[in-house]
């Protein structure tokens, strides 16, 4: 048995593969739900209702989707150039830390900037922190051939340990009654609400705008062509005159900046301060979202909303019928594997030898 590449993938084959991936995911999840002793139909109904069945459910789903959009975009643009950035979690925290350092600890320093100047400075610091965190692994990959998967993954732990030390030390809020959290952002730096009486904030608009802008860059700009060329074949791209090292560095800066901005938006839009448990793994989930979206920036938004809806709905479902909320992780992971296999079958056909 071997795989033979199709001359072209018909829209019907792509649609059939996607439908098969959805059916496979539902069947695998149904087996686990039934094994837990819960009715499958009611479980799925509660899952959908908890994630998308009301105004409150939609607001919580979209709020959860905001940081996932940023980390998904960070993974998508890096993977396009075959820079496998596994460090979005650390870059998210680095951005949040920089945002708090500029927007929270600025007061009383003698540099009383106006809010209209302090807010963009806070976002710029967050983007710069995330970009610089990925710059080192990108240069080591380009110049020394060091595997960026290892370096970016290990940097996550270094950043989290550094954040923990700072929250228990110089950045600790003295009014937090001993709880390890940073000082709050100054008044006026918080993102405004999109929906009254909910936690949904304008970070959603910013994330969607960045997704659209990134799509235009990848499709129309010279940098987008260079990214696609390096991702397809770096040696051929270099032979054709594409500056491979410069492209990888620019992609690293862009990817890290997107993840760092996600940290700043999460602090300014939802929490108002930094804690060590701010992210339940947004950086790692962003990789799944990027793969579900086939590395398409606009698809990242849809994949982030889907994933957030599953996670939010699973929490509601778990409280209602006692099914473990970890079923959401199974659904997301199974859907990723199913989509990858489906996309493979849409591009290749199976041939039996003899």
Image (cartoon, rainbow, N blue to C red):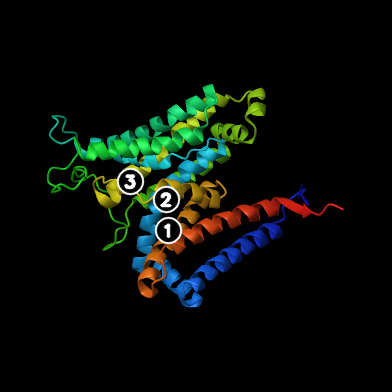
Observer-nearest residue: 180 or 304? Answer: 180
Relative to 83, say whether 271 is above or below. Answer: below
Relative to 242, say whether 116 is above or below. Answer: below
Mark 2 or 3: the one toward you: 2
Q: Residue furthest right?
A: 354
Relative to 44, say whether 246 is above or below. Answer: above
Q: Residue 42 appears at what percent x and percent y?
A: 46, 77
Distance (Cα) linking label 2 and label 1? 8 Å
Say few, some or many: other residues with alpha carbon within 10 Å of mark 3 (under 14 / 14 to 19 / 20 or more): many
Q: Residue 206 appears at what percent x and percent y?
A: 38, 47
Residue at point 50% right, 61% down?
331
The residue beneath circle 1 is: 308
Name the element at disc 1.
helix
The residue beneath circle 3 is: 265
Question: From this viewpoint, is residue 209 visible?
Answer: no
Distance (Cα) linking label 3 and label 1? 17 Å
Q: Is residue 353 left or right of residue 74?
A: right
Q: Is residue 310 left or right of residue 158?
A: right
Name the element at disc 2.
helix
Say few, some or many: other residues with alpha carbon within 10 Å of mark 2 (under 14 / 14 to 19 / 20 or more): many
Residue at point 32% right, 42% down?
264
Distance (Cα) linking label 2 and label 3? 11 Å
Q: Residue 239 appears at what percent x and percent y?
A: 67, 23
Residue 196 appears in which quarter of the rendering? bottom left
The residue beneath circle 2 is: 68
Relative to 312, say whether 82 is above or below. Answer: above
Image marks 2 and 3: residues in contact by CB distance under 8 Å? no
């Amino acid at each position: 048995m071997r795989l033979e590449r199709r001359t072209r993938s018909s829209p019907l084959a792509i649609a059939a593969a996607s439908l098969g991936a959805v059916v496979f995911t539902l069947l695998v999840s149904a087996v686990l739900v039934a094994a837990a002793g819960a009715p499958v139909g009611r479980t799925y109904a509660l899952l959908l209702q908890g994630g998308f069945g009301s105004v409150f459910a939609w607001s919580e789903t979209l709020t959860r989707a905001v940081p996932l959009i940023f980390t998904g975009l960070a993974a998508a643009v890096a993977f396009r150039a075959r820079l496998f950035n596994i460090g979005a979690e650390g870059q998210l925290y680095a951005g949040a830390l920089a945002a708090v350092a500029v927007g929270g600890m600025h007061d009383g320093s003698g540099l009383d900037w106006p809010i209209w100047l302090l807010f963009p400075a806070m976002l710029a610091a967050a983007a710069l922190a995330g970009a610089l965190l990925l710059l080192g692994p990108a240069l080591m990959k380009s110049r020394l051939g060091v595997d960026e998967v290892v370096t970016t993954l290990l940097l996550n732990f270094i950043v989290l340990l550094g954040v923990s030390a700072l929250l228990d030390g110089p950045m600790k809020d003295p009014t937090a009654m001993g709880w390890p959290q940073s000082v709050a952002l100054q008044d006026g730096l918080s993102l405004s609400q999109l929906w009254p009486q909910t936690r949904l904030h304008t970070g959603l608009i910013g994330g969607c705008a960045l997704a659209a802008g990134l799509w235009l860059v990848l499709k129309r700009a010279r940098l987008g062509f260079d990214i696609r060329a390096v991702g397809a074949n770096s040696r051929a791209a270099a032979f054709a005159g594409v500056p491979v090292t410069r492209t990888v560095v620019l992609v690293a800066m862009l990817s890290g900046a997107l993840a760092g901005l996600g940290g700043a938006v999460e602090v300014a839009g939802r929490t108002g301060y930094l804690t060590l448990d701010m992210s339940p793994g947004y950086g790692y989930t962003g990789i799944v979202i990027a793969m579900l979206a086939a590395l398409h920036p606009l698809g990242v938004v849809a994949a982030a909303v889907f994933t957030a809806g599953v996670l939010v709905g699973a929490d509601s479902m778990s409280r209602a019928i006692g099914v473990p909320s970890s079923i959401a992780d199974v659904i997301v992971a199974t859907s990723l594997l199913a989509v990858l296999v489906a996309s493979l079958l849409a591009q290749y056909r199976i041939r039996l030898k003899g």
